[in-house]
Each structure stands twice: as C-alpha cells, then as structure tokens.
Amino acid sequence: MIVDTSFGSDNHAGVHPRILDAIREANSGPAVAYGLDDFTATAVEKFREHFGKNADVYLVFNGTGANVISLATLARPFQAVICTEHAHINADECGAPENYSGCKLKTVHTPNGKLTVDDIGRQLAGRLDQHRVQPSVVSITQASELGTVYSAEEVREIAAFCHGHNLYLHMDGARICNAAASLGKGLGEISGQLGVDMLSFGGTKNGLLLGEAVVCFNPELSKHTLFIRKQAMQLASKMRFIAAQFTALLSDDLWLQNASQANRMAKLLEEKVKGIPGLAIVQPVQANAVFASLPRQAIDKLLKKYFFYTWDEDKNEVRWMTSFSTTEKDIENFAAAIRESCK
C-alpha cells in the first residue's frame, strides 16, 4: 500500500539521506565478511562512546532478532521473562522469543505500558517450585508500546529490584532514541548506567534502512552471544552495510536530531487535535506516538485517506505515529482531516 503520508508507524518512513550516503560510501571495494571489517570495528567504537568502553555490541538485521538474541542469552528454557501484555516481544513477534529461547513470557496488565517493581514482585511467587517456570529476566520497553517513557529514576528502581532478586533486566529499545530525546539525556544514561543488563538498540525506526543492535553491559553475560546470533540467523555476511549506518546515526547527534523531530511532531499533533469534539487523548504524549479515542465513523473517514492503526476496536482507540521525516505541513493537513471527520 502506497500512501502520501502515513501515521501508521515510524517504520513507514524512508531512509535518512545521511544514512544512504554512509551505505554508498561503504560500497567501495571489498571488505572482510561477517563483521571482521573496519566498518564494523568503527561502529562498535561509536557505540562504546555512548554506552561505555566495556559494552559488547552485536549488529543484527531486525528488532525481533535483537530481542530473541538478548532473551536467549539471559534465560534458559525452564525460565521466564516478565513483561507487559503490550510488549513487542509478547504482542508482535509471532511467538519468536518463546519459540527460539524456549522460555515463557509472564505478562502483566498495565494501563500505561510500563512495569513497576510491584508488578514484577507479584510475578515471583513459586520460585524454586520445580513445577513452575522460574523468572529470570524482566523486559521493559523504552519508549513503551503506548508511547510512554520510563524516567531514569523508574529504570534505576527496577534495575535495583531485579538485581536484588536475582533477575536480569533487558530493555527493548526499539525507540530508545525517542525516549532519550524526551528525557533530555544520553543513550547510556538511560540504559547501562542505570543497571540495564542487555539492550536491544533500535535503528530502523530512527532513519536506518535496516539494522538493530544487541548491546550487553556485562561481557560475562554475553560470552555465548556471538554463537547465539549465528544460530538465530542474524549474522550478516556483508555487515559493513549495517555498521556504516550505525556509525552515521551515532555521529554528530543524528540519532538525537531524528528522534527529536519525531517527538516534536507528535506533540504538535496533540496540540492541534486537543479540543476537537468527541476526541480524547488517552495516553501522555512523551515520545513519538499519539493515542486517541474518537467516534468510529470518524476513524472510518480518516482511513480512506491516511494509514494508521486502530489500537483498540472496542474503545475506538487509535495510534498515530510520527517519524523523523514527518513535517509540520503533514501535521497541519492531518489535524484538519481529523477535525473534519469528527463533525
């Protein structure tokens, strides 16, 4: 489906021109395959500038691959991962984490897409009971699937609770750049420095053609990740073309510029649609997502011109996503269409 403007996902955006330039520059002569090249070495060093010199970095094709590899590294088949019911690993990965790692997902209902230490604590009953899966990992999503953002204090508190209860903390950071921009902090400041053990770092939603990364903050934990990545079919032969993109993204604050633009457009959309009769914003707009409820007939009218997802059919809730390439004109036009559809 080709549309002029999509608010369905930041995945619908094209590739940032600087990323395309980086791919083009990497396409010059031969390079050793499977990540044993200078481009990959440079990208890993760029990651370490943001996440610390001891971070282990594994480049992969996609977000599901990054999550699967992270969880397979941290959990054994008789163990469990605690996450929200809305988590991507639970709702949008076709059972891949459970199928590949063999572990079970223990889901928690949360109104805002975020876990608390109380939520986690309630999932720990039955530890050491041989009849039950044993919780090993907590997975949080930053920014969450409902567009909300964990504060640094919230992540630190969860990490401390996890480590005090012999649990690892994984962060699905498909939109970590948007979260960092929202919080006004660096990438490492909202992940590894707060006690996150393993991070799935997103690139595709923030301007890359393809490519995500697994970042481990404890090299002892990732001693087998190299082989898990290969078994999971996430080892790129021509890895230089993924690596070059990350070097560009993590240089000269491109990651921050892209994420900040997406966040600004979401806030602008919120401002433009507030007060429209019959429309309500149902989640705080903290990253690049706007969740709203509006009449069913209005949704149907809008879908004839714009692509977006109805998040909850029963409640007539929709999700509108913005990206680095969304413009103020796009927002003006979309807001006008929303206002017209609600008449």
Image (cartoon, rainbow, N blue to C red):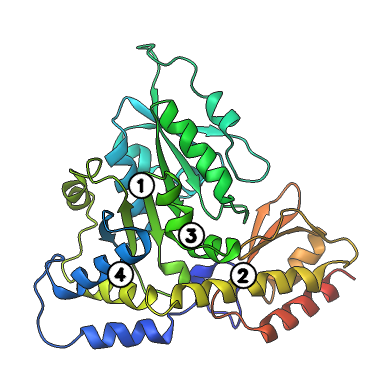
Q: Which residue is mark 3?
A: 176
Q: Quadrant of residue 63?
A: bottom left
Q: Position of residue 196 (x, y in %)?
A: 41, 45
Badge 2 marks a residue whose secondary structure is: helix
For the residues marked 2 and 3, what is the alpha-carbon distance in whole angstroms? 12 Å
Judge whether residue 322 can be spotted in this image.
no
Q: Which residue is mark 4?
A: 46
Earlier sequence position, callout 4 versus callout 2: 4
For the residues marked 2 and 1, what is the alpha-carbon distance in whole angstroms? 25 Å
Q: Position of residue 92 (x, y in %)?
A: 48, 50
Residue drawn 57% across the image and 46% down it: 153
Label for residue 198?
1
Label for residue 263?
2
Q: Are marks 3 and 1 in contact (CB under 8 Å)?
A: no
Specify few, some or many for label 2: CA neighbours under 10 Å numbering under 14, 14-19, or 20 or more. Answer: many
User: Closer to the camera, 188 or 24?
Assistant: 188
Identify the amino acid type marked 2: Asn
Picture layout, residue 328 above or below residue 343: below
Q: Position of residue 118 (x, y in %)?
A: 60, 29
For the residues marked 3 and 1, what is the alpha-carbon distance in whole angstroms? 13 Å
Earlier sequence position, callout 1 versus callout 4: 4
Identify the amino acid type marked 3: Ile
Picture layout, residue 21 above or below residue 279: below
